[in-house]
Image (cartoon, helix red, strand yellow):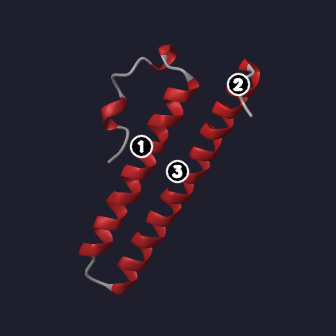
Amino acid sequence: MPHNRREDLDWSAMSIQEILELAIADEVEARDYYRRAADLAGSMHTRKVLLSLSEMEQGHADTLRRELDELLLQRDLEAGMAD
């Protein structure tokens, strides 16, 4: 599951962009985990629950992507590079 490979990171040395990118990757990994589990589910109820969890993880990833996009846009605006 996500996060277990993150324990060795120096979070204090990471930028907010790097943190958001890692968080997005974790959400996508969790989404895919639940989708694979749903494909193997033995009952329709279990499958529906797992697919619902997968959709939630996708929603988290989408939210984080919007935050990252906003951060990058703000940086561009501050640097005078945005259209």
Mark toward the viewer: 3 or 2? 2
Give me the residue at 50% from left, 58% from top. 58
**Do the residues under discs 3 and 1 have CB atoms within 8 angstroms?**
no
Q: Amino acid at mark 1?
A: Ala
Q: Nearer the viewer, residue 12 or 66?
A: 66
Question: What secondary structure is found at the residue carrying circle 3?
Answer: helix
Measured in 3D between alpha carbons, the distance from the residue under mark 1 to the one under mark 2, in whole angstroms, is 27 Å
Give me the residue at 63% from left, 46% from top. 66
Measuring from the top left, give residue 47's x and y in whole percent.
36, 78
Characterize the local packing of mark 3: few (<14), some (14-19) or many (20 or more) Cα atoms within 10 angstroms: many
According to the image, label 3 marks what residue?
A: 61
Task: Return the mark for residue 25.
Answer: 1
Label whose residue precedes the other's in the sequence (3 or 1)? 1
Task: Return the mark for residue 81.
Answer: 2
Q: Quadrant of residue 34?
A: bottom left
Q: Nearer the viewer, residue 75 or 9?
A: 75
**Do the residues under discs 3 and 2 have CB atoms within 8 angstroms?**
no
Question: What secondary structure is found at the residue carrying circle 1?
Answer: helix
Characterize the local packing of mark 2: few (<14), some (14-19) or many (20 or more) Cα atoms within 10 angstroms: few
Mark toward the viewer: 1 or 2? 2
